Amino acid sequence: MAKESFTRKFMRATGKFRVIFGPAHSSSLDHEMTEANRKLLAQRQAETQQWETLHRPDGSTYVVPRNPEDKSLR
């Protein structure tokens, strides 16, 4: 038998608490990504590449488009 993951041990140990304190969705935690999830992940990663984070002297940050003329993902 394969070694049980920490997540599975935690979920098994806290099962009764989860039943009492709220509904818990139980699903496989070690499944392969579906094709739809892979496509969505690639789209989200492409969206994040269009932005650049700038830092102000006071330490705060804000985002601006890398290329203001590119409207492909906005």
Image (cartoon, rainbow, N blue to C red):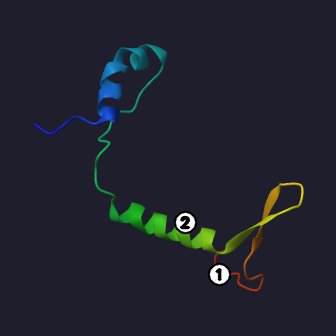
- Residue 15 located left or right of residue 21: left
The x, y position of residue 56, in whole percent, is 86, 61
SS at circle 1 = loop
- Residue 53 located left or right of residue 57: left
Numbered circle sitting on residue 22: none
Task: Name which quarter of the figure residue 34 lies in.
Answer: bottom left
Q: Which residue is mark 1?
A: 72
Q: What is the total number of numbered labels drawn onto the structure image?
A: 2
Q: Residues within 10 Å of mark 1 (few under 14, many from 20)?
A: few
- Residue 23 located left or right of residue 54: left
Q: Residue at x 15, y 39 (%)?
A: 2
Work out which residue is located at the far bottom of the displayed protein and give it: 69
Q: Residues within 10 Å of mark 2 (few under 14, many from 20)?
A: few
Viewer-closest of 27 and 53 = 53
Query: How far apart are the two marked residues, 1 and 2, measured between alpha carbons?
Result: 13 Å
Can residue 74 be seen here?
A: no
Residue 36, placed above or below residue 5:
below
Q: Quadrant of the C terminus?
A: bottom right
Q: Which residue is mark 2?
A: 44
